[in-house]
Image (cartoon, rainbow, N blue to C red):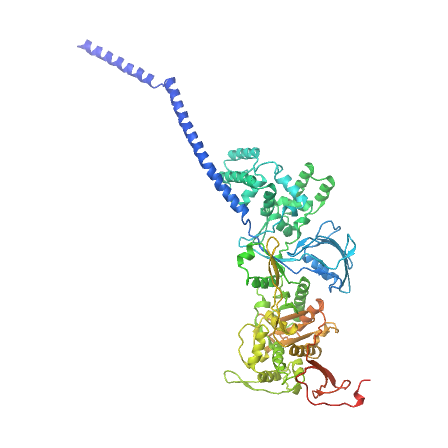
Amino acid sequence: MPQKKAKARQTKKKSVKHRRVVKKKSSRSSPVKKTHFFVKLLQKLRTFLFGFIFAGCLTLPFYFYYLDLLVKSQFEGKRWSIPARVYARPLELYEGLKISADQFERELKYCRYHAKNSLKQSGSYQRKNNVFAVHTRPFSFGDSIEKSKKIRVEFADNQLLSVKTMQMKTLNQVVRLDPALIGSFYPQLKEDRILVRLSDIPKSLHNTLIAVEDRSFYQHHGVHVSSLLRAFWENLKAGKVVQGGSTLTQQLVKNFFLDSKRRYLRKLNEVFMAIILEWRYSKREILEAYLNEIYLGQDGSRAIHGVGKASQYYFDQNVSDLNLSQSALLVTLIRGASYYDPRRHPERALKRRNRILDGLYQQKKIKKWGWKLAKQSSLGVTKKAKGSSHLFPAYLDLVKRQLRENYKEEDLTSEGLQIFTSLDPIVQYEVEQAIFNGLTTLEKSRWHHREKLQSAAVVTDTVSGDVLALVGGRNYRYAGFNRAIDANRPIGSLIKPIVYLSAVTEPAHYNMVSLLNDEEIILKNEDGSDWRPENYDKEFHGIVPIHTALTHSYNALTVKLGMNVGLDKVIRTIKQFGVQKEINAYPSLLLGAINLSPLEVTQMYQGLANTGFYSQLRTLRKVLNQQNKPIQRFPTTLKEIADPQSIYLINHMLKLVMREGTGRSAYNIIKNDIAIAGKTGTTDGLRDSWFAGFTGNLLATVWVGRDDNKPSGLTGSSGALQLWAEIMKKSQAQSLELIEPENIIHLWIDVPTSKQSYEGCESAAVFPFINKNLPSGEVTCSSSFFMK
């Protein structure tokens, strides 16, 4: 037994040992099995890769097709929302034009002309005393193109003596300057750009851009393979996208089609779209789009895009006028408009600009003398960006309101319209100065008023109704409450010429010397109380002729006359003269108890200044599209609203107002040999000071008062008239010569009795009359009173 057990144990140990050996051997793979495993793995990878490539081959054309449609639709469609540009009237130079040398230089500056040592560039000028040499810019007016030329302009005694072309030394009949850009209407995206063509770009800017941003731009097909591989390697090492390796075409794609986030997929799209862009479009088209799209700065909430707008924003010049130094600075900004902002970081910008100039010289793109000259130049940026939208905000407000009658908001902010207006920068400047300086003077003379006075003014052409100038407040450079349009205030005695016109249109009853009694008159108010209109001097003047009543602005007599004529007729006359608002038939209307804005008053007086013809006040002359093609014109329209004989009589009375009545102090400012017509207006409590008047070529309305409606302490004569006279003195106002219509005769009248008299009598004066109603009676004078 013991032997059997020992044998069994020995057999079991062998069996266990054998199993261990077998197990150990089985844990090792044979070379054949290992090779078989890798073969299977490679087969699976190959199948996956072939599947991936096959799927890519099927998908990629569709993806390229999608990107191609995207590129084509955006690049060939409306690429940008272009703000409308608003221009002043162009200045036409001709012999005899009433303009001073200083006014001409100011006009040049409004048009962004710069005083230079030479006239190589258009948009430059030189002045020596009253003689100017000017290199004008080319400009398309839609109906004609004014070519660039060098002219010599000479002035004397506030008048243009001659205009000569310097090259030909011949006398030019008329030279038209390119107009001043006075504003823009911006899109909601707040992107501002001025589209330029490649032909507008100076050679210095073109060469600098290519040398710095993409030297092989004209050789590659959208991408640089070596640059892409280098960028890929740097990105791989960094674990994120840190380099782009972009060509100029890729930069355009990134800015025009894609967002700014750094992702591999966006980079892939950028490459594909750059290739498509180069395949579909010429290098010229791509470069032109780049020049108009690139971001180059920030003006408040508005982004400055493209070299056209950037040139104006930084240098106040057209892009075609840029020199090498300025071109290098614009290219500097491409790498970082904020980082290299020349106004905020001038040293940083100067350093990079000079580095670019050095590179151009090393590449033999510029000559040594040009390199040295450019490096010695300052940055040349203006101290402050001259945002044209802030030049004349009140005037632009009226332009936009009138445009909205024909155009939608999106038309004004995205279609690149070119809007030509009637704004006269010379007159506008004089109005601004008259208001600012005049209010300061009035406040000093009335020092007890702590609240500042405010004012508004409108100036128009007496015939066309063109609005030449408009100021909405003493802070004329800031947008805000536009008093010229929106301040509706009682107009006081400005209504009286309309009341008297309503009377003399009945020649059988009234003429210039008809006698009326200036006495107390009592009328009932709506509440049953008595209304007793008083004269300004608190006195009544008895029997006086009509012309005297208007000349001295008698209130009581005016109310009596208006009631005799009829309130309904007076209201009809007011409506005929362009006042569109509802008017209540209260007797107080006859003394100006009607609220109008300065613009509405100007519209009413336009009919008087234009001899009884209505012409709607306008700021617009024509509108061009982005391609300089006219799409709308705004011609002057005239409509007869009063017979010329009656207007002639009223205007004669308004001239007497200025010579003998409430407006006579204007001649302390304006030279005495000019005839003017107008009327003062003062409201209760001396709250509002008004004056509306006209010369042979200009009509102006001025209001002075306080925004809180408290008394200003000024009459029409002591306030608004003084500002009005300063405007006319500086604005080349022409003497008013009334054109005598048919059926008007002139008679010598004895002033005290209003009866016909004779030339040479001591108290006789000449007055015009409508032939239907002549004064009755006659007086004689002794021969001793006759003039020898």
Foreground: 754 or 306?
754
Count the marks: how many? 0
| Residue 383 in picture, x, y percent from top left | 66, 53
Q: Which residue lies furthest to the right in this view?
A: 788
| Residue 722 in picture, x, y percent from top left | 68, 72
| Residue 571 in picture, x, y percent from top left | 56, 78
Residue 534, visible in the rendered structure: no
Instruction: Please determine whether, in this image, residue 12 is positioned above or below residue 556.
Output: above
Instruction: Please determine whether, in this image, residue 422 is positioned above or below residue 22.
Output: below
| Residue 2 in picture, x, y percent from top left | 19, 10
Foreground: 23 or 777?
777
Q: Which residue lies furthest to the front in this view?
A: 742
Horizontal side of 244 relative to 163 (left or right) equals: left
Instruction: Please determine whether, in this image, residue 151 is positioned above or below residue 608.
Output: above
Instruction: Please determine whether, in this image, residue 604 is positioned above or below residue 87.
Output: below
In the picture, which quadrant includes the N terminus? top left
In the picture, which quadrant includes the C terminus? bottom right
Residue 278, visible in the rendered structure: yes
Residue 491: quadrant of the picture: bottom right
Foreground: 349 or 66?
66
Residue 573: quadrant of the picture: bottom right
